[in-house]
Image (spheres, rainbow, N blue to C red):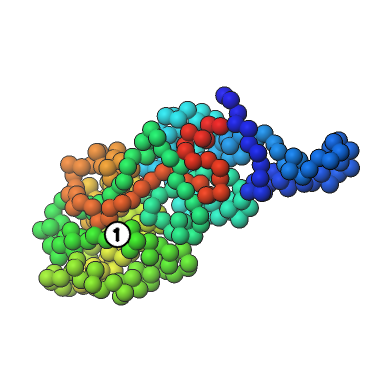
Amino acid sequence: MKKYLKRLGIATGLSLTLVAAGCGSEDASQEAPTGDSNDDAVTEEVSVGEQLDFTITGIDAGAGIMAATENAIETYGLDDYQLQPSSGAAMTSALDAAIEREEAIVVTGWTPHWKFAAYDLKYLEDPEGVFGAAESIHTIVREGLDADLPEAYQVLDNFYWTPDHMGEIMVEVNEGAEPADAAAAWIEGNQDIVSEWTNGVDAVDGEAITLAFVAWDSEIASTHMIGAVLESIGYDVTLMSMEPGPMFTAVATGSADAMVAAWLPATHESYYEDFKEDFVDLGANLDGAKIGLVVPAYMDIDSIEDLKN
Ligand code: PBE
C-alpha cells in the first residue's frame, strides 16, 4: 500500500511536540544542516492510518452503525483498521480528548447529535454509499396496542418532530441537565407542537405503559420527551433502557409497549427484518437522520477512501 506523505502542521500536536523535543537536544541541532528552518524540521512521513493508530472509535457493539462500519472497512479495503467498540459516552469523551490536543481521530457518528453543536466536525464522504442516504427514525408499537391503550397509540402515531427539536434536548442533557428535566422544559416551550400530538386525545387514569430505548444520546432525548407527553395525559410511564437487539425483541414480544428509536431503512435493517411481522410500524417520527464516519474539521481528509493513505 502506497503511503501518503503528510506534511505535519500545527494541527498535529503530538508529532510537533516530539520534533520540538528533538530539536532541543544537542544531537539534533548538530545533525540539522545549518540554516534549516523550523518548517523543515516538522516535515515527517506519517500516514493517516498511523496518525489514527488504525483505530475507528465506535460505540456499543449492537448498534447498527457498528455493523455498517465493519461493512465500510471491508468495502473500502481498510484492512489494517480495527473498530473499537465502546459506548456513546466513551466515544464522545475520546472525541473531546482528541480535539483538546488537536489529534487525529475518526468516530462512528450520527445526526441528530449534540457533538455537531459542540465541536467543528465533518462527515467523511462515502462514495460507495455504505452508510446509506438519509435515515428516518420510526415509532414501533406492539401488536394490540391500538385496542389496549388507544390514547397512547394515537399520541405515538401523531408524534413527529425535527432533528433541530431533538437537538435542543440533547444539547441541554450534554450540558448537565437530567433528561427528564430537559424533556419537561422542551415540552413547556413547545406546547404548539406537542398539542398537535395530543389534541382530541382523551386523558387516561394511570394506566401503565412501557417504552423501550437504547441509551444513545438521541434516543435518551426522544424517549424521555414522548414519555413525559404520555404522562401528561395520565399514563404511568416506565422507560426501559436496553441493548438494541432486546429493544426490538421487547416490542415484538409485547414485553414493552413501544419504542421511538428504530433507524430505517438502513441502520436497523437487520433487526427490523427479523421482527417486522411481529410489531406495528407507525412510520417516521423524524426525518433527516444520518450515520457515518466523522472526524474533526481540522483533519486533512475528506473521504473514507482517504483513510487508506
Ligand atoms: N445510532 C443512534 C444508533 C441508532 C441511533 C446511530 C448510534 C445505531 O447505530 O444503531
Instruction: Compare residues 89 and 248 and report the one nearer the observer.
Output: 89
Residue 101 appears in the picture as rendered: yes
Task: Please tell me in which quadrant of the rendered image residue 169 appears.
Answer: bottom left
- Quarter of the N terminus within the rendering: top right
Q: Is mark 1 within 8 Å of ligand 1?
A: no
Q: What amino acid does circle 1 point to?
A: Thr
Tell me residue 34's x, y (percent): 86, 38
- The residue nearer to you, when weighing 307 against 56, is 307
Q: Residue at x 38, y 72 (%)?
A: 181
Query: Where in the figure is residue 133, as x and y percent of width and height?
Result: 32, 42
216 over 3 or under it: above or below: below
Image vertical order of residue 304 relative to residue 195, above or below: above
- What residue occupies the far top of the structure in this picture? 1
- Which residue is pictured at 24% across the width and 60% down the height? 160
Which SS class for mark 1? loop
Q: Position of residue 269 (x, y in %)?
A: 29, 40
Residue at horizontal 78 percent and vertical 43 percent from the top: 37
Q: Quadrant of the C terminus?
A: top right
Q: Image point 27% across, 61% down: which residue?
A: 161
- Classify 10 Å Cα crowding around label 1: few (below 14), some (14-19), many (20 and above): few
Is residue 207 at all visible to an observer of this figure?
no
| Quarter of the image where one finds residue 256 | bottom left
**What residue does disc 1 label?**
162
Relative placement, left or right, of 70 versus 165 is right
